[in-house]
Amino acid sequence: MSRNCAIVLAAGKGKRMGESINKQYLHIKGYPVLYYTLKAFTQSDCIDDIILVVADGEDDYCREEIVKKYNFLKVKNVVIGGKERQHSVLNGLRAVTNCDIVLIHDGARPFINESIIQNAVRYANLYGATACGVMPKDTIKMKDASGFSMKSPNREMFFCVQTPQAFRYELILDCHNRINNEDIMVTDDTMVVERYGNKVYLYEGSYNNIKVTTPEDLEIGKQILEKVT
Ligand code: CTP
Ligand code: MG
């Protein structure tokens, strides 16, 4: 059995939400967004430790109002994030100890479930790198600079990637250190390992596993919670 650690990212600014506080601390049905995320990883049978990455200046608040208040005992460390998401991930990775598989997850995806977490661990053990996601439901177009469609590629070839994304720890730490030295920008962690020739196994996540990004998502989130609980 592998030892598995989850890095939960909550160090963004939540600009698109347009609120004065970080979106992770906004409430849905009486609890902060980050509460649901941490609850899922805490209750998971296959997660040993959680490293929480928070914004500079929000660490005391997060420790008191989330970790202590809801008794999230698996949170072993609260570390400060960086300017971009990838810097926050690297800070999280450097704080991990004694772990075979690391799951990297957006704190802003509170509707993660146990089977997605278990599959992340399973496929990371098998293939070294994995990410969940969903097939696009709409027809996909390529668009040119003047706003006209160029092509309608086969939808079967596309996949909308979510988190968690899970990796063998040594692999993801090494790739993140390398990309940090090269100063290349990426939007997720699959791109980090792909850059150095590694393949990522893609498995089915859930359409409910949304990233709370704009104000409408708080309402959609409420509906998801009412449906699943
Ligand atoms: N994140 C982070 N550190 C950063 C940027 C993002 O830990 N420097 C985290 C966010 O807290 C979020 C996840 O990465 O859980 C996905 O990012 P996103 O949805 O873009 O969140 P924000 O960057 O906070 O939002 P926005 O882009 O609207 O400002
Ligand atoms: Mg962002």
Image (spheres, rainbow, N blue to C red):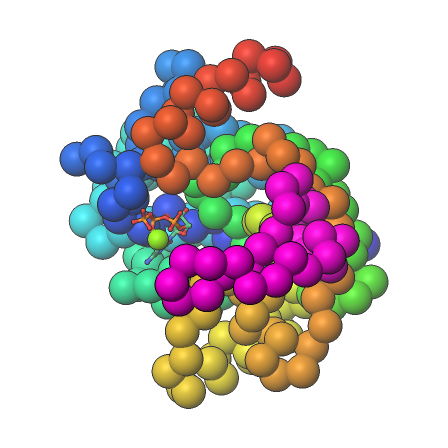
Q: Is residue 86 visible?
A: no
Picture coordinates of residue 91 (x, y %)? 40, 65
User: Image height check: is 223 above or below 23?
Assistant: above
- Along the line of sight, which residue is nearer the eye, 67 or 130? 130
User: Image height check: is 61 above or below 160?
Assistant: above
- Along the line of sight, which residue is nearer the eye, 124 or 222? 222
Can residue 136 be found in the magenta stretch? Answer: yes
Q: Residue 115 appears in which quarter of the rendering?
A: top right
Q: Residue 181 appears in which quarter of the rendering?
A: bottom left
> Residue at the location (42% across, 14% down)?
29
User: Image height check: is 25 above or below 86?
Assistant: above
Which residue lies most toward the bottom here? 182
> Residue at the location (61% across, 62% down)?
151
Q: Which residues are magenta?
A: 130-159
The answer to whether residue 125 is left or right of residue 174 is right
Q: Is residue 15 visible?
A: yes
**Quadrant of the image containing the N terminus:** bottom right
**Quadrant of the image containing the C terminus:** top right
The answer to whether residue 166 is left or right of residue 119 is left
Can residue 61 be found in the magenta stretch? Answer: no
Picture coordinates of residue 102 (x, y %)? 61, 59
> Residue at the location (61% across, 14% down)?
227
Count of labels in the image: 0
Picture coordinates of residue 199 (x, y %)? 72, 72
Picture coordinates of residue 123 (x, y %)? 78, 56
> Residue at the location (49% across, 29% down)?
36
